[in-house]
Amino acid sequence: MDGNASPGAMGFQSLLAGTLAKIEIPPRPVLLDKLMAEMQQDEPDFHRLAGLIRADVGMSASLIKTANAPIFGYRSKATTVREALAMLGLIHVLRTLAGISLRHAVPETPELKLFWDTSARVAYLSGWLVKQVGAKDGIRAEDAYTFGIFHDCGIPVLINALAGYEATYQLACKEGGRPLTEFETEHHTLNHALVGCALAQSWLLPQVHVEAILHHHDLAVLSASAADIPVGSRRLIAFGHLAEMLDATATGASDHEWQRMGEACLAVLDVSSDRVAELQAAAIEILKGVE
């Protein structure tokens, strides 16, 4: 079966169950469970939520830094966890903390540090692009930022779990020409989109993100007639690929996927080629200020 086949073909849960049977997904952080339990109360206690987050100094600092990111456009600056909670809202705080936790879920190597740094830039650019192109189909800057963090999260999981996967990944990046997911499935019977999809669902991301992660190398789902994927998922995929292209342009890296999917992504976002040139120039300046 094609690793990017529609969940409707065999049942979404069956698809994820098959993935989980082949590889161990990093467990959801305990903090996310505690936060979700409190958030599900009739009247969530913001003081308790802030206390749970403050117990992890690194998590607190990262949350405040995220809340103050210019891409979200908040007029005031958060100086405390409680202020960050009020600015971001409960749901986005949960997703932000999931993204922060993700980097620590897999042992880091020098290669993975480069991967996470790239993911952080792509996430930032994805959120920024929503501000430039416009929020639509329920996708806000916060949603695109979260997708940017998680869209390739299956790659570090597979690097850590499967012998020989890193060599497959490097070969696919050099050759290009076809989706990374095809290389992966050919050599390992599963791919990073499936693994990332399973992780995203386990880590409480919304379905629009889960399906975007599953299909983000599938050109066919970007068609307006594609019925098996939410329209918001298509928009997330398009923002993600455009952000990756902008990052590659700014850093001098190659982006084979843009050659294959770029035209369809621009159609989804209703962005012209002239506008792309403007975004490329602006993104270079934007990234100079991203740590």
Image (cartoon, rainbow, N blue to C red):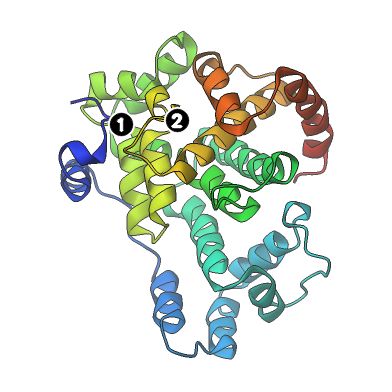
In the drawing, does residue 180 fall left or right of residue 274? left
Above or below, 204 against 109 in this view is: below
In the drawing, does residue 174 fall left or right of residue 263? left
Q: Nearer the viewer, residue 21 or 259?
A: 259
In the picture, the quarter occupied by the N terminus is: top left
Q: Nearer the viewer, residue 244 or 279?
A: 279
Q: Nearer the viewer, residue 136 or 61?
A: 136
Q: Amino acid at mark 1?
A: Asn
| Residue under numbered circle 1 | 191
Residue 259 tag number? none
In the drawing, does residue 274 fall left or right of residue 232? right
The answer to which image quadrant residue 168 occupies is top left
Q: Nearer the viewer, residue 255 or 73?
A: 73
| Residue 35 position in % (x across, y down) | 46, 77
State the residue at coordinates (36%, 62%): 28
Q: CA distance from mark 2 to mark 1?
A: 25 Å
SS at mark 2 in the image: loop
Q: Residue furthest front?
A: 225
| Residue 84 position in % (x across, y down) | 68, 73
| Residue under numbered circle 2 | 224
Above or below, 89 against 234 in this view is: below
Q: Nearer the viewer, mark 2 or mark 1?
A: 2
State the residue at coordinates (53%, 90%): 45
State the residue at coordinates (78%, 54%): 70
State the residue at coordinates (32%, 58%): 202
Q: Residues within 10 Å of mark 2 (few under 14, many from 20)?
A: few
| Residue 139 position in % (x across, y down) | 57, 50
Residue 114 seen from this side:
no
Q: Earlier in the sequence, mark 2 or mark 1?
A: 1
